[in-house]
Image (cartoon, rainbow, N blue to C red):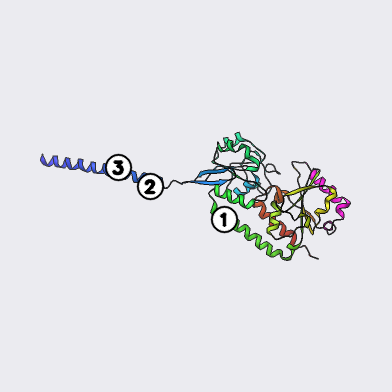
Amino acid sequence: MFRSKGIYTLAIFFLISLFVAACGNEEPIKSKQASTDPAPRTIKHAMGETKITGTPQRIVVLTNQGTETLLELGIKPVGAVKSWIGDPWYDHIKDKMTDVEVVGDETQPNIELIASLKPDLILGTKVRHEKIYQQLSSIAPTVFTENLGNSMVENFRLFAQALNKETEGTAVLDDYNKAIEQTKTRLGDKTKLRISLARFQPGKVRVYYKDNFAGVILNQLGFARPDAQNKDEFSADITKEQIKVLDGDVFFYFTSDREGNFGATQTADEWLKDPLAQNLNVVKKDRAFKVNEPIWNTSGGIISAKLLIKDIEARFENLKIK
């Protein structure tokens, strides 16, 4: 009997020891699990600071430029604003945008639709969306660029940071800079040609200076600009009597035709057939080229930038310098 009691006591002691050991190990297990949780990242942007935890998976993007940032980083957004030209996407990205929800356009995104997509990150720009920032922020963490057009590289870096893709973003920009330098080398003395740049709209013509999407890339490639266009400004409307400001060694122009309206092309035809235009050196030398507006202007993203570089090199490949 004494022996039975001893065995019983020993068994109870053993069970108690297991229980205490389990309780003792519980806290370290919890601590270890907590230590693996990602810490919030603070993203500084045009509207202040936004905290983002981990890597966002459901992204809504409210700029055409931002859409290209996501695609170049291998991310398909759950929602995006409609391309300025296309049904609903630009030709050069439409194959990558299947099943992406259209959430309005850049100037008027649909807030209710955005909310219904349950995003964990919203990307936009102050220049377009400042008034709705608070509404968007109440839906999900929101990050804004300051503007568009001339700041493609800076905006790309910001969004890559928000997406927790800084390493991948750095690699993309390294490849872009390499393309610039290699193309610049291959172009050689052709970069001394003065590039004229303009946009035709229905009943309106704008000369484009250096501080815009295409102007920045032309400058990175080392191209000269005509004296009348060698300004660190965006653009200016001109009259037909001012058409001489479009002269140069090579003239690139794009036409803003939208949704079956060809008023911009009609304006371009009218201007370029005018005797004032026919007297321009660039027209006499047959060096006026119509280029793709989404690539050269309205998209403003990293994919378009790379396509623009290729377009320039292709056009200059067989151009003889006299």
The extreme right residue here reads 275
Q: Which class describes the residues within 10 Å of circle 1: few (<14), some (14-19), or many (20+)?
A: some
* Contact? badges 3 and 2 (CB < 8 Å): no
Predominant secondary structure in magenta?
Answer: helix
Provide residue 163's location: percent of width, then percent of height: 55, 47
Label 2, secondary structure: give it.
helix
Placement of 200 over or under 191, stated as above or below: above
Q: Amino acid at mark 1?
A: Thr
The one nearer the camera, 71 or 287, is: 287
Residue for point 81% across, 43% down: 203
User: In terms of sequence position, does the residue under pointer 2 or pointer 1 come before the other?
Assistant: 2
Q: Which residues are magenta?
A: 259-286
**In percent of the image, x 16 and y 42: which residue is there?**
7
| Residue, disc 3 | 23
Calculate the distance from the C-alpha at mark 3 to the C-alpha at mark 2: 15 Å
Of labels 3 and 1, earlier in sequence is 3
Q: Which mark is residue 32?
A: 2
The picture places residue 238, in percent across and down from the top left corner, at 80, 48
Magenta span includes 277:
yes
Cα gap from disc 2 to disc 1, whole angstroms = 32 Å
- Residue 37: image location, x then y, percent: 44, 46
**Residue 170 circle label:** 1
- Specify whether residue 10 is in view: yes
Farthest left residue in view: 1
Amino acid carrying mark 2 in the image: Lys
